[in-house]
Image: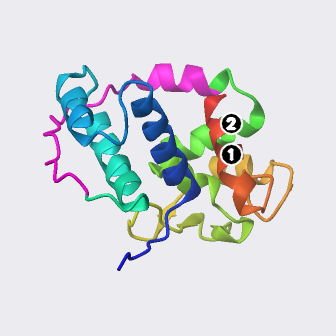
Amino acid sequence: MLTTTTLRICTINRRVKAINQLKTHVDLFDSEKVVKFLNESKWKNGTKNIVLQSYDDFQRMYGLTPVGIRKYHVVQQLPFVPLEQEIDALIAGCSQRLSCYLSLLKETGMRPIEAWSLDWTDIDTVQKTVKIRTAKHGVARILPISERMVNLIFAQKKRSKYVFAVSEDETRFNKELSHFTKS
């Protein structure tokens, strides 16, 4: 019996993209060729693991026996962290809305999706805090923000119940975030 799990639209889109990429290189119904391709490809191991998960879903969808391929070992690397002056220069060169968004990310360290999901009611102007509903199975939390940040946020035009997102439609929500973050 197949069990179903609820996946976010962005996860589904990433898996579909992975399968489409894979099918340009090999026949998806020949699991030996898929395994050989993945072992020989120059893709990073993290990408190979995403493709493996996607391929496993593909096989189950077609009633095929999933190939028990073990995950590829991913070597953790330290991320590039720009200097604070570089971050400030980036923020200063952006539009008011994007500048506010980036400043909030810098000040609080929240994930982009968490900032995108902020309601106007999540901001406490008296205590100067912001309530964060978590993303990616994290922990909900309340973080302090500066008076300057409160002023930047409330200088934004109210377009919807969200501070940054324009649409309240779930299907457009992630597309808007993707478009906004590409800016």
Instruction: Locate residue 159: give its quadrant.
Output: bottom right
Amino acid type, label 2: His
Residue 98, horizontal then vertical, whole percent: 69, 36
> Which quadrant of the rendered structure holds the N terminus?
bottom left
Residue 136, horizontal then vertical, whole percent: 42, 60
Query: Residue at image x 59%, y 38%?
Result: 102
Examine the rendered structure and indicate whether residue 21 appears above or below residue 161: above
Provide the residue designation for mark 1. Answer: 175
Q: Is residue 172 magenta?
A: no
Res 104 seen here? yes
Residue 78, horizontal then vertical, whole percent: 22, 31
SS at badge 1: helix
Q: Magenta segment range?
A: 66-91
Magenta stretch, main secondary structure, is: loop
Q: Which mark is residue 76?
A: none
Q: Residues within 10 Å of mark 2 (few under 14, many from 20)?
A: few
Provide the residue designation for mark 2. Answer: 179
Judging depth in this view, the residue of 66 and 166 nearest the camera is 66
Query: Residue at image x 45%, y 46%?
Result: 15
Residue 13, horizontal then vertical, whole percent: 55, 47
3 lies left or right of 182: left
Query: Residue at image x 75%, y 29%?
Result: 95
> Which quadrant of the rendered structure holds the C terminus?
top right
Judging depth in this view, the residue of 174 and 33 nearest the camera is 33
